[in-house]
Amino acid sequence: MIVLGIETSCDDTGVCLFHSEKGIISNVVSSQVKLHAEWGGVYPDLAAREHTRNIIPVLDRAVKEAKVKLSDIDAIAVTVAPGLIVSLVIGISSAKALSWSLKKPLIPVHHIEAHIFAIFIEQEVHFPFIALVVSGGHTELYIIRGFEDYLYLGGTLDDAAGEAYDKVARILGLGYPGGPIIDSLAKKGREVIKLPRPLLKDRGKNRFNFSFSGLKTAVMREAQKGIYRKEDIAHSFQEAVVDVLVGKTVDAVIEYGIKNVVVAGGVSANSRLRERFQEESQKTGFSVYFPPLYLCTDNGAMIAYTGYRRFKETGRTTGLDFEGKARLRLDRFVDYIRRGAGQ
Ligand code: KG4
Ligand code: ZN
């Protein structure tokens, strides 16, 4: 079976062809990073315009690189939620047009679900596991008990972890996206400023929630003093973010007695986060899994694979009249498609 996956929820146009026996047979991502660098973040109207320009060339390249014909495709999977609505609708409309003209089923996929299940493209992980999803738009903790069996533990109350990286990079005048730049700059610095670890010690209703906007403000205050090197600010900031992300995930591991952890999304590419998770997994006694770097940031492969898995495990497809959703939590998305999204 060949599943075509389309991802346009933010600023990357991604198309992948996934073969049930051979795995990924093509995976094309057109990044808009250079375009958004000027704004220091994703500018929605610009993102939508670029998706409109790129979607067919990316699709064409993916089909050619896979050396298949459009008629060889058995199903089309597409990101339905969450994301920038102006970006989502371009992928959704293209997927609907393909599904309608090729007369092939359409499979709805949730962006966060796809980040999590990307891990299975190259390795096996046993259920249940804790999933920490950290990206430019999301910071969420789930227990994944099986496919479509998701328990939401918590998420960010304000900025996402990747958003905090991008904003701090802007404060320090480092460029966009800030995550990889801060990641490498921090290696040259030391923790000279003790920054807050927001909600880390919270044992109440926010014990699995996150908050990064206060941390960003604290960084801004310290940077304005003009006495610290950028390397040291970057290092101090990264230590605070990583402490919170690792600390809360380990708390969930202990509270629920779960032995496997999957870390996914753009920020899971972070070298310090990976290092600290490896250390903690040995100390606390759990296994930690990261997708390979090319599957951490947004891509069509995670959509195609998750769509394939949905089709194989549930046979679930959708009609052509469903809509994209800018905000829809993963556990609620499952209810939405079980009720028959758009059918
Ligand atoms: O998953 P993704 O491509 O898009 C969203 O769904 O948001 O994640 C992009 C985010 C950006 O905020 C970027 O700064 C961050 O991931 N990122 C990193 C690293 N690589 C990408 N953050 C920290 N360290 C990295 N090495
Ligand atoms: Zn993403």
Image (spheres, helix red, strand yellow):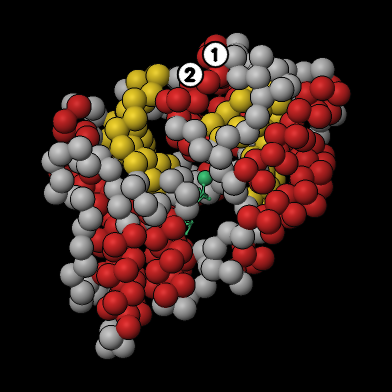
Residue 172 in percent (x, y) is at: 41, 77
Residue 100 in percent (x, y) is at: 82, 22
Identify whether 249 is placed above or below 168.
above
- Horizontal side of 276 relative to 289 (left or right) equals left
Q: Are marks 1 and 2 in contact (CB under 8 Å)?
A: yes
- Horizontal side of 83 relative to 153 (left or right) equals right
Label 2 environment density (alpha carbons within 10 Å; few <14, some 14–19, many ≥20)? few
Q: Secondary structure at mark 2?
A: helix
Give the labeled residue for mark 2: 335
Kindly indicate the quadrant of the structure image that contains residue 241. Answer: bottom left
Label annotation for residue 339: 1
Residue 117 in percent (x, y) is at: 48, 31
Disc 1 within 8 angstroms of ligand 2 (CB)? no
Task: Report how far apart the C-alphas of labels 1 and 2 lie in the structure.
Answer: 6 Å
Q: Is residue 7 among what the camera can see?
A: yes
| Amino acid at dot 1 | Arg
Kindly identify the residue that appears in the image at 74 percent across and 31 percent down: 95
Disc 2 within 8 angstroms of ligand 2 (CB)? no
Kindly identify the residue that appears in the image at 14 percent across and 49 percent down: 201
Identify whether 327 is placed above or below 317.
below
Residue 111 in percent (x, y) is at: 53, 36
Label 1 environment density (alpha carbons within 10 Å; few <14, some 14–19, many ≥20)? few
| Amino acid at dot 2 | Asp
